[in-house]
Amino acid sequence: MEKSKSLNKKTVNKYVPLFVLAVAMLWIKTYVSQKMQFKLDVDGVLQEFLLFINPLGSALLLLSLSFFFKGARKYWSLLLIYTLMSVLLYANVVYFRFFSDFITLPTLFQTQNFGDLGGSIITLIQPTDVLFFVDVIVLAILIGSNRVKKESGNFKTKVILPVITIALAISFFNLALAEKDRPQLLTRGFDRSYIVKYLGMYNYALYDTVETLKSSSQRVLADSDDKTEVLNYTKSNYAKPNEDYFGAAEDMNVVYLHLESFQTFLLDYELDGEEVTPFLNSLIGDQNTLYFDNFFHQTAQGKTSDAEFMLENSLYGLPKGSAFITKGQNTYQAAPAILKDKGYTSAVFHGNNGTFWNRSEIYKSFGYDHFFDIESYTNLTEEDMAEYGVMDKPFFEQSGELLETLPEPFYTKLMTVSHHFPYHINQDLTTIGKATTGDPSVDNYFQTARYADEAIEQFFTQLEESGLDDNTMVVLYGDHYGISDNHNQAMEQILSKEITPVENANLQRVPLFIHVPGMKGGVDHTYGGQIDLLPTVMHMLGVETENYIHFGADLLSEDHEELVTFRNGDYVSPEIYSIGEKYYNPKTGLPLEDAQLEQAEKFQQQSNYELELSDQLVTSDLLRFYTPDGFTPIDPADYNYQNDKVEEAE
Ligand code: GP9
Ligand code: MN
């Protein structure tokens, strides 16, 4: 009895200082990282305090799990937990540099995508990042060396319990203060950066895990009745076609040009007096082209895949992760499937690995007949390759040839890649200088945009030469921002104006062009977003959409409501912008006048409801319970893209 007591005391005396050191190091490192590496918009003393205190509770709690291990194992478990937490923190730091966001479990499942990010990840890692692991090494040396004698004793509950109680007390105190500053923080979630700001990196990871498990259980619990509310909403939101445009492209081929990272501000921008995108600018004045200058991207974490998801389905991407990844097995009634019943053959062209964003799987659920990925492109030299696949010019050259092999009419999507962060391009291929803000992403952005513009012009020439141009509708759209708000300081120099919340929302405009031979063109100022593309294009093809569950509405319809909902719950409309739970007058950039608050609230409720219903539909896979009249359901097992690949001669 006497012996075990003294052993326990010795264990405490030896282990506790090491434990305290570990907690202190992890706390400080996490605080400094949260403060310096993430953009959390910390406002006021309370938020500053919360940011400082929030890593302590979780560091104490998680590291104290080592107390449960016996003998020397508790030293090694301490090191293991410490290392895992450090890796989690660092992974988020790197991820944030690229996405301005935090890792979520669904994005982690896409290991292939992380592998493919390869080149970009290297540009995101900095030599000073070693500092993130100096403490891990210190701890490892301390534990590994013989100087720290690893006491074989175990902790008694009366030692463990107070530590855990203190850890929990700190965490609850933290949560209570956070809820005071931001009510419903956990129930509504708001924004991942809020959770990190208020509760810290590690509690965020815990929160995300719980949310992900919750979401995967939803599918199991859903039944056919759940679709009724969604169907009622989308029916009431339906906008009937504009007679002047309905069927304007009937039986024509469709070519979507997916313009990677293209923002609208590029179009009228002149860099040192020179147009950046002369070809696209000329399309604005083309007599057979409609150009939408108030068109917005509505993507979130799924970036490119969110844009694709919306334009194929008129359903919103998920609030976190990518529906392409986590909902690839769902039932869909996507554009290729709708058009299959009208005799269309469908294909995607993308000079990247087919597995990126899980495309090679979800395209089957969409009913795509062909998927030409990197393995369909031949004789590529190193110069032909960008970080995410084939450079746009060789890509269009070969895609154009493949396009001609398809039976008509076809519905196709060509995905460009060379204008992608970090906008590197061989200087021999450039025809415009860089900007000079000193921020490399912003400065390079114009060169790859110009290259893309030239590539698009080349594609239009190819279409003419092949004779397809007379009978092909071409839709060009920007997928999402290329310059995140992390670069707003440099963007203020580029645009010579302050980037207020309203200006930042304005920067989320992406171009939309719809070119149809024989159709009356012009500039259309309608406010709309990617969610509206599917019904707009279907109506132009002469296909009615009334029976489909679509959250968007035909941009050309008189019934189209000018309310563009962003994935984070913000919205824009001609008179009112809602940004971060504040309402603005977009014309003045100032807070909204009282007289319009009622309308602002109404729009907000509608936006929230629409996102909620779309999420319900996607997370619970509700389309499996609904088949529109005249639609033939898709069986993904019928699709195989092996034959679209070519064996390159040795
Ligand atoms: C990858 C490409 C880029 O294949 O479409 O995707 P993004 O990083 O823009 O989401
Ligand atoms: Mn993209």
Image (cartoon, grey):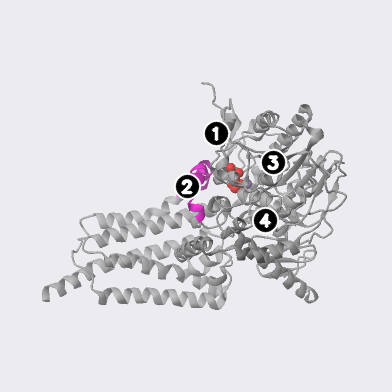
Disc 1 element: helix
Are dots 4 and 1 in contact, CB under 8 Å? Answer: no
Which label belongs to residue 642?
Answer: 1
Q: Which residue is mark 3?
A: 449
- The one nearer the camera, 162 or 427, is 162
- Is 531 located above or below residue 412 in the figure? below
The segment highlighted magenta reads: 106-128
Distance between the alpha carbons at the discs numbered 4 and 3: 21 Å
Disc 3 element: helix
Q: Which residue is mark 2?
A: 111
| Res 598 quadrant in image | bottom right
Q: Residue at x 43, y 57 (%)?
A: 88
What amino acid is at disc 2?
A: Thr
Dot placed on the residue nearer the N-terminal end, 3 or 1:
3
Q: Which residue is mark 4?
A: 298
Distance between the alpha carbons at the discs numbered 2 and 1: 22 Å
Q: Crowding near pointer 1: few (<14 within 10 Å), some, many (20+)?
A: few
Distance between the alpha carbons at the discs numbered 2 and 3: 29 Å
